[in-house]
Amino acid sequence: MSPVPRRAARRPASAGAELPRWVLAPAAVGALLVLLPLAALVLQVDWADLPALLSSEASRAALALSLRTSAAATALCVLLGVPMALVLARTSLPGLRVLRSLVLLPLVLPPVVGGLALLHAFGRRGLLGGQLEALGVSIAFTTAAVVLAQTFVALPFLVVSLEGALRTAGRRHEEVAAVLGAGPWTVLRRVTLPVVLPGLASGVVLSFARALGEFGATLTFAGSLQGTTRTLPLEVYLQRETDPDAAVALALLLVVVAAVVVVAVRGRPAL
Amino acid sequence: MRTAAGVVAVAALLLAACGGGDAAPPDTAPAGATAPAPAADGLDGTLTVFAAASLTEVVGELATVMEQEHPRLTVRTSFAGSSDLAAQVEQGAPADVLATADERTMQRVVDAGLAADPVPFATNTLAVVTPPDDPGGVASFADLARSGLAVVVCAPQVPCGAATERLEQLTGTTLTPVSEAGSVTDVLGAVTSGQADAGVVYATDARRAGDAVRTVAVPAADGAVNTYPVAVLDDAAEPAAARAFVDLLTGPEGREVLAQAGFGAPDGS
């Protein structure tokens, strides 16, 4: 017997309720506002030199570092975010609402502010940095600092996605499983998590994308050194100074990744 | 469920888009907002000056002087990295005067046919800065090559990084920095926050930072100077006012303000 719920049938478009026509105009302007800059960027790409620009040593180092750190940050997000989402969605601890708002803060925080906050927590003279330094652990200017910054900004995406999925799924299946004698760990493993797997997948993809795009906190907190802390967005920012064509080529790479992410999250078959 | 995921996706994308805005638009606030009294002076309208970030104090002060001398003139200033300013001018930004932190960047604008005859008006040298308590025990530029020291410099792609590379060659010192920042302010930030043990910045930045850093003089830095050129842009909407501003900046009054900020005189004198 499969724990996955029956998929909801796609609702047919209703013919009765139509939108007022004028809504189309601002909607079209909005769409243009988003699409025009992206189109302009694509038009700027020097296609003939693209392979050379993307395969330069600096570009490859930045891409490899970005993929490695984003994967590590996403893994950390799953490790920490899944329990967080479970606690937020399934418990009624006091102060949970406040906690939820605070945990989601990095979603709306300017990245530079996040970087400053991380600096004052984990920097060499930060709240914990001093103690860590005394223990011989220094994360300043290391790849670990990049992962930390990425996890900081990406974690809320996973928590929001998964918590939403948990609330939508409801507790009925879990209660039935418990009544049938399943322990909490079995319920979590065999019922809860399989049910919210699509939500978790969305969260994973979104956090990976956010980690890949992280710029401000990395620049403020981790520094910028080829192969160690200079991720793709930092490389784009630096290349812009001397080689705008290379910057555009790398930017295109990030746009492609973003497009793949959007398709992965939105374009899945109806759940 | 599909809707929930969709909403999250859209919200996430919007937020990511908003969050990425670190390349903030240049600050173009008018330097003086008071209503000017009419005067028997030919200059009026709005003069727009684009200047390298390291000139923020100097150009800001001279803009105020300019407005006092010409009450019907408003001076708007925009400060950013020289490369950004050059790119903005190339894309048709409405500027009358451009002052950059090195000649290479100005040459880009001249080559694009947007300005002619830039005038060198200042020089800047490099200095080593450390946190005030000097945790790394840095006494000279050569000390920066010591292993275990967290040194931050500018990336070679930006003017201060190119000057740092020249200084390394001049002194025969090879640095292994922990970070190559994209701007001199990022280097200064890493030092003032105590993240880095030392950093290489412009002498003017070291002076501006005051007590937040300890400055180590680098005698050899005289051989690694950056020359700052200024030019009136060909498309200037206020060419007369632009010319007057360049005269002020290159004249005795400009020289005094520049010297106070730690800039050297051009011609290497």
Image (cartoon, rainbow, N blue to C red):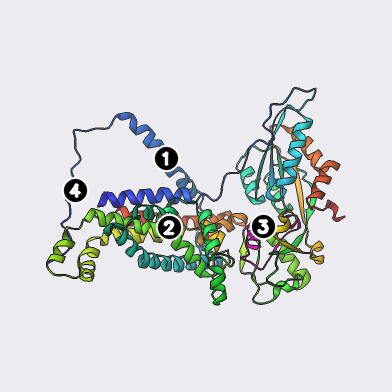
Labels 3 and 1 share a subunit? no
Q: Secondary structure at mark 2?
A: helix
Residue carrying label 1: A32
- Determine the CA span between mark 2 and mark 3: 27 Å
Count of number-bearing discs: 4
Q: Earlier in the sequence, mark 1 or mark 4?
A: 4
Q: Nearer the observer, disc 2 or disc 1?
A: 2
User: Where is residue B157 drawn, in percent x and y?
Assistant: 64, 60
Q: Position of residue A43 (x, y in %)?
A: 48, 48
Q: Secondary structure at mark 4?
A: loop
Instruction: Answer whether residue A22 is magenta in the image.
Output: no
Asked if marks 2 and 3 fall on the same chain, the answer is no
Is tag 2's residue or tag 4's residue first in the polypeptide sequence?
4
Q: Quadrant of the N terminus of chain A?
A: bottom left
Q: Are marks 2 and 1 in contact (CB under 8 Å)?
A: no
Q: Is residue B74 visible?
A: yes
Q: Secondary structure at mark 1?
A: helix
Q: Amino acid at mark 2?
A: Arg
| Chain under numbered label 4 | A
Q: Is residue A217 above or below residue B10?
A: below
Q: Residues within 10 Å of mark 2 (few under 14, many from 20)?
A: many
Give the left or right position of residue B248, taking residue A8 as reference.
right
Residue type pointed to by label 4: Arg
Query: From the viewer's perspective, is residue B6 above or below residue A141?
Result: above
Q: Which residue is mark 2?
A: A210
The numbered dot on residue B184 is: 3
Work out how far the residue at label 3 is from the one at label 1, CA to CA, in angstroms: 37 Å
Which tag is nearer the camera, tag 2 or tag 4?
2
Mark 2 → mark 1, Cα distance in angstroms: 23 Å
Could you say whether the residue bearing mark 3 is in a helix, strand or loop?
helix
Q: Amino acid at mark 1?
A: Leu
Q: Earlier in the sequence, mark 2 or mark 1?
A: 1
